[in-house]
Amino acid sequence: MLKDGVLEGFTPSFKSIQKDCDRYSNELVKLIEAEAIEARDYIALSGKGSLWIVYQYIEQGLLDLVEAHVRSQVTGRDFYGPLFENTRSTLARLIECSEDERVCRLYRAAIEHRLKAVKAEAAIRDRPKSDSQARTASTKWVKAVLPTVKKMTQDYEEILATKASVDPELLVFQRSVQAIENS
């Protein structure tokens, strides 16, 4: 049934990470319905299984599929928070596999996605002709999300430093964060 928190006998299709994660989730639901596992364990087991699936794709060398999957997660339409633990683990595994440029592309995409949204909200916050409710809401949103962008930028800078790499985009990100903080 489960071995080290992962479903035994589950085999990814190696065509779509999301579809494999969905199939995995369905198997967990069947186990809950059969009362073989507790419903309260679903989220932890699903997360562990999803990460295991991604690692299987990495081991198979399907790195383009992994990159596309992670990119869709870090640039989700309504997702502006910090990177999930599984995402950070996936990025760390990619670094272990010497996929530094791939990790840099994913970090840039995640930062750009959040920075674009923060800039738009900061523009509302800073526009004197905006109504006060809109400015207040935008101020709160920027205050909530900007620390995430700043932290991701710092994390990206650390990754570049450990690899002795330089990315001119990093300076653009840092200046944008600073401009938003100072306006």
Image: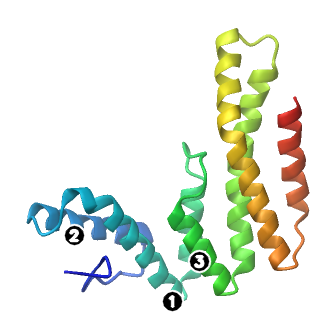
| Closer to us: 116 or 92 | 92
Tell me the kind of residue under disc 3: Asp
The residue drawn where x is 74% and y is 45% is 115
Position of residue 24 measured from the top left corner of the image (x, y, whole percent): 29, 70
Whether 10 is drawn above or below 39: the answer is below
Above or below: residue 10 compared with residue 71: below
- Left or right of 26: which side holds 141? right
Amino acid identity at mark 2: Glu
Residue drawn 74% across the image and 33% down it: 120
Which callout, 1 or 2, points at the residue further toward the start of the chain? 2
Which quadrant of the view contains residue 129? top right
Q: Nearer the viewer, residue 109 or 144?
A: 144
* Residue at the outermost bottom position: 60
Q: From mark 1 to mark 3, how far is it between C-alphas? A: 12 Å
Residue at label 3?
Answer: 64
**Number of the front mark, 1 or 3:** 1
The span from disc 2 to disc 3 (Cα, nearest Å) is: 26 Å
Along the line of sight, which residue is nearer the eye, 78 or 6? 6
Q: Please give left or right for residue 39 compared with residue 120 in the image.
A: left
Image side of residue 171 versus residue 73, left or right: right
Residue 74 percent across, percent down from the top left: 59, 57
Q: Which mark is residue 59?
A: 1
Q: Secondary structure at mark 1?
A: helix
For the residues labelled 1 and 2, the Cα–Cα distance comes to 23 Å
Q: Position of residue 97 (x, y in %)?
A: 64, 87
Q: Amino acid at mark 1?
A: Glu
Please identify the quadrant where the C terminus is shown.
top right
The local crowd at label 3, few if under 14, some if 14 to 19, many if 20 or more residues have their Cα within 10 Å, is few
Tag shown at residue 27: 2
* In-front residue for pair 12/161: 161
